[in-house]
Amino acid sequence: MGLKIYNTLSRSLEEFVPMSPGKVGMYCCGPTVHDFAHIGNFRTFVFADLVRRYLEFKGLAVDHVMNITDIEDKIIKRVRENKTTLKEYTGKFEAAFCEDLKALACKPPTQIPHATEYIPEIVSLIEKLVARGVAYKAPDGSVYFSIEKYRGCGCKYGQLVNLNFEGMRVGERVSSDEYEKESVADFALWKARVPEDGDIFWPSPWGEGRPGWHIECSAMSMKCLGTSFDLHLGGEDLAFPHHEDEIAQSEGAGVQADGKPFVKYWMHGAHLLVEGKKMSKSLGNFFTLRDLLNKGFSGREIRYLLLTAHYREQFNFTIDGLQGARTALARIDECLSKLRELAKNASGGPDDLLLQKFSEALDENLNISGAWGVIFEWVRQTNRLLAENKLDSTAAAAALAAWQKIDAVFGIGVEKETEAPAELLVLLEERQTARKAKDFKRSDAIRDELKAKGWTIEDTTKGPRLKRI
Ligand code: AMP
Ligand code: ZN
């Protein structure tokens, strides 16, 4: 059976048929590196990783492009506030982002373009839009995209969202990168240099300035994947204005072959809430990945939890949910370890029935809860067969071979004996000292603190060591 996905463009489920057989060009809007990414951002990046991995499971070669937005309004503001340079500022957060992606076992994208390295492509795209009459230089020196001219050419503005043009005033302009749906207005492609920009500007045919956020993604995606490509992803908040503007700029430049769209399929991931509320620093429910790792959870547990909900459903992320993730993973790990013990050196082709059930679920617009349902039912049955001694080594090897293919999609890997972080090893030392001094109150308090962070103390012949709960 073929894969069906929900295409925001047609607002319907469609069979996924790549433009060139066997190959997929996929672009996912990357992070704006103005701060550490939060757990909501990572829901979207783990979703993109799942899509890529599942397309690969289906035998497709995926060119996965994720840009780094290293120049936009928020970044400029932060660079100014921190009295630093653009490169130094964004470099720090980009490095942190890549580390976090790795902790979540996301495959590195095949291409990672940076907006600041694509200024010539951006300028050339704006030149095409000006030449075609759908962009103009405004009195403030900036270049804007004209919605009216674009619509006048028979093009549709409002392909991903329904827009109301009634209140629209011709030529009304919006200069900031992020704006509301109510503002159907001409948006900035090139922003003329202003004193607040400091030394962040580039030359252009319209004077010194910098690109708007939306044009960056049009230029980078078309340069990396061609003017028409298969799949574009992002969080649901990006559908308007960011993705709508990307379509307008890319198709408005008239660079596609006749009848070809800029992008064939658009997928949008729903947002993540934390403890039932929109994340916000003032509510105390705002988590970066690092915050959660520091609480003692592993990247593997966080990835698992992010992968339990369907990508189009709003997801409520909770600390209790992370505890549940730990228990669920332990069930899978225990079953796999028994299978490994039984299989020893036996080999066998993968259990096709299990693979078939798994892909039947994911083929339905990535029905991940269906796929997990298949896995947990398999774990339950395998445990029963193991308990009744009804599995032989070949069957165990076949089950493990199927799991290997399944895990190439889930990416939750096998439990690793992870080394405890240095600060917890210091606590363990302190506990030993407290015990020697017969300060049991202190030693019990340390044990509880370690437990709260997900570690238990195990006595071994070499002395006590920390083990994950
Ligand atoms: P940004 O770095 O702000 O450009 O965001 C990076 C990605 O995270 C985009 O695809 C956003 O749509 C997505 N995103 C932002 N907030 C959330 C959230 N709460 N839940 C899921 N995705 C989000
Ligand atoms: Zn983008």
Image (cartoon, rainbow, N blue to C red):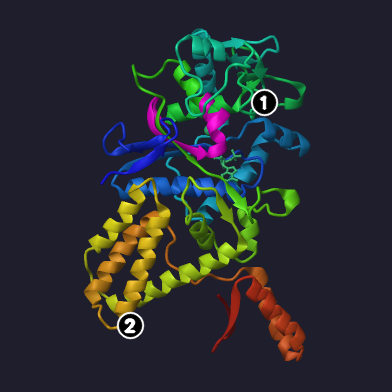
The residue positioned 41% from the left and 54% from the top of the image is 368
Q: Is residue 259 left or right of residue 50?
A: left
Task: Name the spot of residue 181 as percent of width and height, x first.
Answer: 61, 27
Q: First in sequence: mark 2 or mark 1?
A: 1
The residue positioned 30% from the left and 47% from the top of the image is 58
Q: Which mark is residue 189?
A: none
Total label count? 2
Q: Is residue 26 left or right of residue 16?
A: right
Q: Is residue 344 visible?
A: no
In magenta stretch: residue 226: yes
Q: Is residue 324 left or right of residue 336?
A: right
Q: CA distance from mark 2 to mark 1?
A: 63 Å
The C terminus appears in which quarter of the rendering? bottom right
Q: In front: 146, or 100?
A: 146
Q: In front: 263, or 458?
A: 263
Q: Quadrant of ligand 1?
A: top right
Task: Name the spot of residue 266 as percent of width and height, x first.
Answer: 44, 34
Q: Is residue 271 visible?
A: yes
The residue positioned 32% from the left and 50% from the top of the image is 57
**Residue 88 image-quadrant placement:** top right
Q: Which mark is residue 387?
A: 2
Q: Amino acid at mark 2?
A: Ala
* Mark 1 lies on residue: 176
In magenta stretch: residue 57: no
Magenta residues, start to end: 225-245
Q: In front: 119, or 15?
A: 15
The residue positioned 57% from the left and 28% from the top of the image is 241
Task: Name the spot of residue 137 as percent of width and height, x first.
Answer: 62, 10
